[in-house]
Amino acid sequence: MSNPIKDKATEWWQLISNKETADAYKSFFQLTWKILKETALLVWLLLCFVLVSIGWVWNNSTKVTESVSNLNNKKDPDSNVMAEAAVKLWEASQKSAFNAMTNARKQLDLPDLPPKAPKAPKAPKAEKSEPAKAAPTESAKAETEKSPAGKTPEQYAQEQAAKDAAAAKAKADTEAKAAQEKAAKDDTEETHETSA
């Protein structure tokens, strides 16, 4: 009688040690390694593509920002402190993003973007010489005093702050006076109640 365990073990060993089995496993691991390598490369290229796409959106949004900034400069050139700070921050982050995008383009074998021409510095605006005007009438003087058009933004802001402070003081005085009157009334009522 033969031993069934020994027979199965011998059959198993022959299957494992067979040259075809070794070749099949070898091709399986080689194919798996190749698939993993190609997948990693594909993921890297997709990441580079996303980075280049972000750069494209960035450039187009920069153009929109510049056009809005130009419109803003035409309206009120003196109040651009925050806009200038935002532009400086935008330019700094744009430079670092451009470097990352250039590296991604190299990875994708895409041509480099042509460098942007530096902006010419803005020439200071020459003050317009106004023709001599006739002396303003009394009604024109009163109108100028009422409107902020003849004042600098700082002067107008100071006047508004002074008006606001005066209004707040008047309100506080009114409230304090009302509180004093109420306290006096309460004292009078307590005096009447104790005497009664």
Image: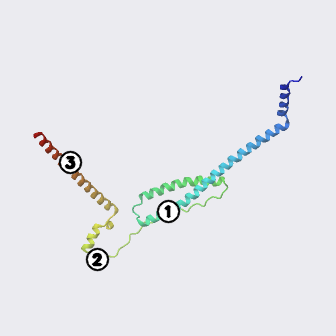
The residue singled out by tag 2 in the image is 134
Q: Is residue 44 left or right of residue 175?
A: right
The residue singled out by tag 1 in the image is 66
Distance CA(mark 1)–CA(mark 3): 56 Å
Label 3: state its secondary structure: helix
Residue occupying the point 83% across, 31% down = 12
**As drawn, 117 above or below 43:** below
* Residue 11 placement (x, y as % from top left): 85, 30
**As drawn, 2 above or below 196:** above
- Amino acid type, callout 3: Ala
- Could you tell me if residue 22 is visible in this image? yes
State the mark number for residue 171: none
Q: Quadrant of the N terminus?
A: top right
Which quadrant holds residue 127? bottom left
The residue singled out by tag 3 in the image is 179
* Residue 93 placement (x, y as % from top left): 52, 53
- Amino acid type, callout 2: Ala
* Residue 94 placement (x, y as % from top left): 54, 55
